[in-house]
Amino acid sequence: MKRILTIQDISCFGKCSLTVALPLMSSMGIETVILPTALLSTHTMFKNFTCADLSGQLIPITEHWKAEGITFDAICTGYLGTEEEIDTVIGIIDKFRNENTLVFIDPAMGDNGKLYPAFDEKYAKKNADLCAVADIADPNITEASFLTGLPYKETYTEDYVKDMLHALSELGTKMPILTGVSLSEGKTGAMGYDTAKKEFFCYQNDRVPAAYHGTGDIFSSVLAGAFVLGIDRTEAIAIAADYTAHTIAETLKNPENPWYGVDFEATIPELVDALRRIKK
Ligand code: PXL
């Protein structure tokens, strides 16, 4: 069984970061080891959330793992807290990485042209150091724009997406994958660039007309899981994009309209079926 380490916060209520990554990766048949960086009452889109910083625990926990001889097939990161924490996480990646380890970075820090409330531009730039050590990094267009300094655009051409991917690969990321990319009216998906092969790859599905919090984390968790399972890159983004779109569509049917996070629990069986179809 593949074993993945996921490093991000626990938002107790709100369906994002670890409370999404753990169930999704587990349901994909991957042993999922968590390293919580902070403990929040809710994610930061709620007012008055509490937050206990756990970054002082990261070194003692990972030193214990090292002493136990624990290894990982992949290390992935999501929402982190501070610039110092990013340095600590880079050190952890360095400590556990070998030639077969997949390092997957989701530089989760903003959406819709804006950074999340807890972050500033300095923090955003620091994420470029993290992307520099990534095999795969999957920013959305907002995050990519803060990482590269290229302007954020809501309407754009394929050339803009390709320029963004080139700029991300210049940070050092081997395979940047830009999410939330729409190449035609009514469509959305992702486009990636394989720097070694100098090849672009892309998947587009029908846009479900709704925006919910936490969908980026869902997409990333499934994408990272698919890569760890050895699924081909275009099929990996297709699985992640279809699962995310289907989950948003299901959530739209929920009369309680939970803006804070999507009903990903309802669609896990479809994810498992999609993986079974690929394995056949
Ligand atoms: O990646 C989304 C996310 C994760 N964790 C926390 C957040 C957010 C988005 O706002 O606040 C704590």
Image (spheres, grey):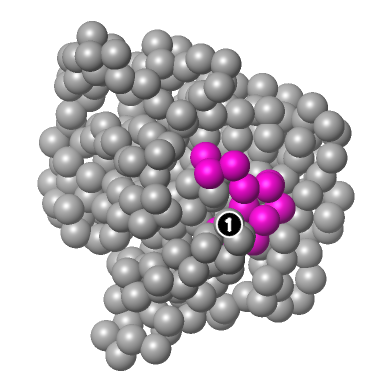
Residue 64 sits above or below residue 35 on the image: above
Q: Quadrant of residue 213?
A: bottom left
**Crowd rating for badge 1 (residues with CA inside 10 Å; few <14, some 14–19, many 20+):** few
Q: Is residue 47 visible?
A: no
- Residue 80: x %, y % from top left: 35, 34
**What's the residue at 18%, 29% (across, down)?**
54
Quadrant of the snapshot with the N terminus: top left
Residue 235 within the segment the image draws in magenta: yes
Quadrant of the snapshot with the C terminus: bottom right
Q: Quadrant of residue 277?
A: bottom right
- Residue 102: x %, y % from top left: 54, 29
**What's the residue at 37%, 21% (across, down)?**
71
Q: Quadrant of residue 265?
A: bottom left
- Residue 252: x %, y % from top left: 42, 84
Which is the main secondary structure of the residues drawn in magenta? Answer: helix
**Residue assigned mark 1:** 279
Is residue 238 toward the left or the right of residue 114 in the image?
Answer: right
**What's the residue at 53%, 60% (across, down)?**
275
Q: Nearer the viewer, residue 197 or 146?
A: 197
The residues colored magenta run: 228-240
* Residue located farthest toward the front when viewing the structure as drawn: 280
